[in-house]
Image (cartoon, helix red, strand yellow):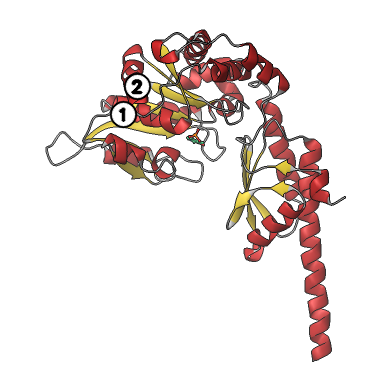
Amino acid sequence: MPDHQARRVDLRSDTVTQPTAAMRAAMMAAPVGDDVFGDDPSVNALQARIADITGKQAALFMPTGTQSNLCALMAHCERGDEYIVGQNAHTYRYEGGGAAVLGSIQPQPLAQGSTGEMALADIAAAIKPEDIHFARTRLLCLENTWNGHPMPLSYLAQATDLAREHGLATHLDGARFFNAAVATPQAGADAFAAARHIASYFDSVSVCFSKGLGAPVGSALCGSQALIGRALRWRKMLGGGMRQSGVLAAAASHALDHHIERLAQDHALAQRLALGLSGIDGVRVRSAQTNIVFVDVADGRAPALLAHLAQHGVLATGLIGLRFVTHLDVDEAGIDHALACIRQFFRGQAVAAASAHVAGSAVY
Ligand SMILES: *Cc1c(COP(=O)(O)O)cnc(C)c1O
């Protein structure tokens, strides 16, 4: 039997998970109603729960993280306002320019260091004075985790203090918010306490249930009653007013009950992968934080390595470097299989290089 039929290890993203049987059962059993009327008990329960977890007054269930971030930006900023954001942040770089296109909000992107931080001096310098020449700087947007990196609490404190001193609101794109909570033990006694602590620096937080938490769909925006009231209007306008969405909210609630503490296992698997890779000539681990491992591949061989892996049922992403993401449908055996395939690839290359050398010698 070909290897790829024997085993499939999908490390492209933590969005590829299948809902577990228990999650599907929770979805089946969910009481539902029309959420545009505010009638869905499962949506209302999820919103109350995630608001409580993040320590905010209110929350709004969203179909996607993109829509949740966009509603947040549009609820914080008006036409002609500006938000400060990392040059490689998701809301700026990977959301189709929605803030500018749909929100008439000018992004002010800033360079980020290798772990995602924008320099405080750069943030301060980018805040425009009150002057008719300038857009009004209204909001600072951070991302946690960023490329897997959990932001240090000291940085969250300093950056959001700086924003507040200048009258800016603060938003956290927390697509992998709970990975950050689990990986920041100094933030709290457990993952939920840590989550609340991290959220406390921000006026609003967007979290995804469809990434490491294993739900099929859904995000939530958390913030003050007033902010969520404005976001509700934008969500409807953007087409995110769903009806019996309690079937989806039930999956998210199930994830909050069962899939938070276990994120530590995904982080351990990423470390197992990084450790294995560190013993292989031809690859270099660039970063391995929380559930994401970035790898540089020597001599432009990343595409060939990706193809080799795919042939053996191991899926990853990348062009120059490769990205591997662990999640609840990956186990130690899967990681070890991926490592074996990568070793085999470089052994094969070494053999090919050696025989090319022999063949070359024969010619001369
Ligand atoms: C995935 C992601 C989003 C968007 O979430 P979607 O549900 O895919 O729209 C936003 N921010 C970050 C950092 C993400 O990784």
Residue located beneath label 1 in the image: 74
| Kind of residue indicated by mark 1 | Met
Q: Position of residue 258 (x, y in %)?
A: 67, 17
Report the side of 116 relative to 319 (left or right): left
The residue that appears at 73% across and 42% down in the rendered structure is 9
- Mark 1 in CB contact with mark 2 (< 8 angstroms): yes
In this view, 33 is above or below 199: above
Q: Position of residue 119 (x, y in %)?
A: 39, 41
Q: Position of residue 17 (x, y in %)?
A: 66, 32
Q: Is residue 158 visible?
A: no
Q: Disc 2 beta carbon < 8 A from ligand 1?
A: no
- Quadrant of residue 319 within the rendered picture: bottom right
Q: Residue at x 36, y 27 (%)?
A: 71
Camera-nearest residue between 184 and 294 = 294
Can you see residue 304? yes
Pick the residue in front: 166 or 192.
Answer: 192
Query: Can you identify the residue that label 2 sits on?
Result: 231
Cα distance in 3D space between marks 1 and 2? 7 Å
Q: Residues within 10 Å of mark 2 (few under 14, many from 20)?
A: many
- Badge 2 marks a residue whose secondary structure is helix
